Amino acid sequence: MPKPHKIAKRKPTRRKVTPHGKSPAGSVGGRIVSRLTKFTKALESGETVSDKFTVRTIRLNLEPTAYDPATVRKTRALLNLSQRLFAKFLGVSLQTVHAWEQGYNVPSGMAARFLDEINANPTYWQRRLQSAAVAHKV
């Protein structure tokens, strides 16, 4: 009859832990400190940082659309709102919406950005309006 194999038990090793019970190297804070230390050393040594680390450049086109009167009216029609309700929804005066739709004025950058968002996802904004509607007793 063959002899059973003995399995050697490893003695547990104690890891250093933070007060929160995580190992410093594995914690988010530990990794941040470690990587910042490496980055600092690279800067101090005069190394080209982009050779040693991943460097990303992101370019965004954040220019809002230029709105003419017809496009403002079309955007308002997407939400099926009167000029008065559209103005209230956008946080501008009725006169402002009227001026946009008559071509006396153009939406500011921030207003144009909001109009862009409405045009990008009209269903979302229709639902938002429906959820904001309050029953009014006559």
Image: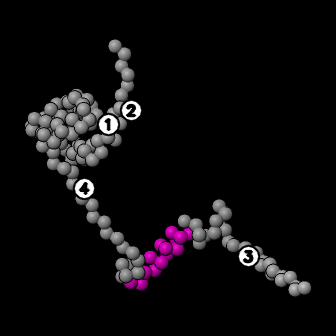
Q: Which of marks 2 and 4 is in front?
A: 2
Q: Nearer the viewer, mark 2 or mark 3?
A: 2
Q: Mark 2 points at which residue?
A: 131
Count of numbered badges drawn on the protein: 4
Asked whether residue 44 appears in the rendered view, the answer is no
The secondary element bearing badge 1 is classed as helix
The reply to whether callout 3 and callout 4 are in contact (CB within 8 Å) is no
Label located before the other in sequence (2 or 1): 1
> Which residue type carries mark 3?
Thr
CA–CA distance in space, label 2 to label 4: 29 Å
Residue 126: image tag: 1
* Residue in front for this viewpoint, 20 or 118: 118
> Which residue type carries mark 2?
Ser
Label located before the other in sequence (1 or 3): 3
Label located before the other in sequence (3 or 4): 3
The secondary element bearing badge 2 is classed as helix
Q: Percent from the top left, x then y, of residue 13?
A: 73, 76
Q: Does the magenta stretch include residue 83?
A: no
Report which quarter residue 84 is drawn in: top left
Q: Name the residue under label 4.
A: 62
Mark 1 closeness class: few <14, some 14–19, many ≥20 residues within 10 Å: some
Label located before the other in sequence (1 or 4): 4
CA–CA distance in space, label 2 to label 3: 58 Å
Label located before the other in sequence (2 or 3): 3
Report which quarter residue 100 is drawn in: top left
Residue 13: image tag: 3
The secondary element bearing badge 3 is classed as loop
Q: Which residues, given as a range, are shown in magenta?
A: 29-47
Q: Percent from the top left, x then y, of residue 19?
A: 66, 62
